[in-house]
Image (cartoon, rainbow, N blue to C red):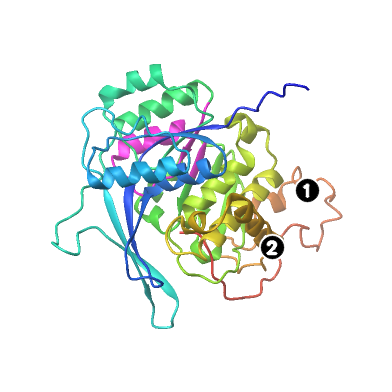
């Protein structure tokens, strides 16, 4: 019998917001406890899909930290780097799911204890003094993921990008503007929500990312490749029956990475626009599936991996209808690719007289939609 060598798992290293999520849902009044925060969700989601995952954090051995460790280990996440340097109390986020006036579930996050009113512990970044030790001890990951800027995350991003890793930066806020600008220089992928980007949009004008992704909640997302002034390409949202939209953006990231970036930066560098689009559609489908469950990673607790992927495939096969073009540009009816001869070599100058470019946006039809992205 032939000895078949197992293909090594893709490796993910995270450094950012890792917390305990406490979810009060509509289905059951009792709270549910999960490892959460953007880094916690991405780490657990990719481990669920077969990745080798190690988060970096400073969680102490408090009650919340014990729950976070147990939950991450349940999904195969390696937890040996969760007590780096001077440890700090585990951050806690309380999510309360309610119904809006029109009956649609919505969630809000609370940052203080409902019993005593005290604020929960905040996020504490990995210390700069630990960076050299991490660089020596931790294997080069295929993907280094962070959602927070600090001196340590910037130095780690610089180090791992220089060694060939993909640096995936998903900011939720600005933090230190100087460090934010530095992180943009080292990022391979830059992903953010339009809502949160209001606080740092002026800082996004110059970056070195190969791929930029902007999400619009129920209106889907758009992406552009390599250059800041390249044309945006929009992807509409999937329609699902929503129970909770929390964690949707994290699942889009998980799906995109699992579909396209198992070898990290080299996969992205070789990818076509169609490859990137397909991977993002896959990520949106996973996010849509998770919206059918309560909690930022609820689907993982109700479905086996096989059933999970089957359900995602069913959502992907239901092609979403075209979304209305958001008026986010001064010229929303045309893109640079529509007027570039190299993008459209099949049309001669004479050919194009009095003709609409073949890939120019068509007249959209409006349709309500529920989706998945924050």
Picture mark count = 2
Farthest residue to the bottom: give it: 102
Residue 52, magenta (yes or no): no
Place of residue 152 in the rendered image (x, y in percent of width and height, measured from the top left):
32, 29
Residue displayed at 20% across by 64% down = 114
Place of residue 279 in the rendered image (x, y in percent of width and height, measured from the top left):
64, 47
Secondary structure of residue under mark 2: loop
Q: Which residue, given by chain and number where applicable, does mark 1 sit on?
A: 344
Left or right, residue 337 beside residue 280: right
How crowded pointer 2 is (Cα within 10 Å; few <14, some 14-19, many 20+) is rated as some
- Mark 1 touches mark 2? (CB < 8 Å): no
Q: Is residue 329 visible?
A: no
Q: Is residue 90 visible?
A: yes
Q: Earlier in the sequence, mark 1 or mark 2?
A: 1
Q: Which residue, given by chain and number where applicable, does mark 2 sit on?
A: 361
Image: magenta residue range: 165-190
Place of residue 368 in the rendered image (x, y in percent of width and height, measured from the top left):
57, 76
Work out whether residue 94 or residue 324 is closer to the camera in this orientation and state it.
94
Where residue 360 sits, quadrant-wise, is bottom right
How crowded pointer 1 is (Cα within 10 Å; few <14, some 14-19, many 20+) is rated as some
Place of residue 243 in the rendered image (x, y in percent of width and height, measured from the top left):
47, 69
Residue 343, placed above or below residue 144: below
| Quadrant the C terminus occupies | bottom left
Residue displayed at 43% across by 83% down = 102
């Amino acid at each position: 019998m032939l000895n078949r060598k197992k293909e090594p798992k893709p490796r993910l290293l995270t450094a950012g917001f890792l917390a305990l999520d406490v979810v009060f849902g509509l289905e059951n009044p009792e709270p549910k406890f999960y490892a959460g925060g953007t880094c916690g969700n991405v780490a657990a989601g990719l481990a669920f899909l077969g990745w080798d995952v190690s988060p970096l954090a400073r969680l102490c051995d408090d009650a919340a930290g014990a729950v976070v460790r147990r939950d991450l280990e349940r999904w195969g996440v390696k937890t040996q780097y969760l007590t780096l340097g001077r440890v700090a109390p585990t951050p806690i986020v309380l999510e309360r799911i309610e119904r809006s006036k029109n009956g649609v579930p919505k969630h809000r996050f609370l940052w203080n204890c409902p019993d005593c009113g005290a604020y929960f512990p905040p996020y504490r970044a990995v210390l700069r003094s630990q960076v050299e030790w991490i660089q020596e001890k931790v294997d080069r990951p295929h993907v280094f993921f962070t959602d927070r800027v600090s001196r340590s995350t910037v130095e780690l991003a610089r180090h791992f990008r220089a060694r060939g890793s993909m640096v995936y930066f998903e900011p939720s806020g600005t933090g230190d503007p100087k460090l934010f600008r530095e992180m943009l220089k080292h990022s391979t992928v830059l992903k953010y929500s339009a809502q949160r980007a209001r606080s740092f949009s002026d800082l996004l004008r110059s970056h070195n990312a190969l791929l930029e992704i902007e999400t619009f909640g129920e209106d889907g997302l758009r992406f552009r490749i390599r250059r800041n002034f390249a044309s945006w390409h929009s992807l509409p949202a999937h329609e699902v029956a929503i129970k909770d939209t929390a964690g949707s953006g994290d699942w889009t990231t998980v799906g995109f990475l699992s579909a396209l970036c198992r070898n990290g930066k080299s996969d992205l560098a070789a990818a076509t626009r169609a490859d990137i689009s397909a991977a993002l559609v896959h990520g949106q489908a996973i996010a849509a599936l998770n919206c059918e469950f309560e909690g930022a990673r609820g689907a993982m607790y109700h479905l086996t991996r096989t059933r999970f992927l089957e359900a995602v495939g069913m959502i992907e096969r239901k092609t979403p209808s075209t979304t209305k073009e958001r008026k986010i540009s001064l010229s929303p009816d045309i893109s640079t690719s529509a007027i570039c001869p190299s993008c459209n070599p099949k049309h001669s100058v004479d050919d194009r007289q009095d003709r609409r470019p073949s890939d120019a946006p068509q007249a959209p039809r409006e349709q309500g939609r529920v989706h998945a992205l924050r």
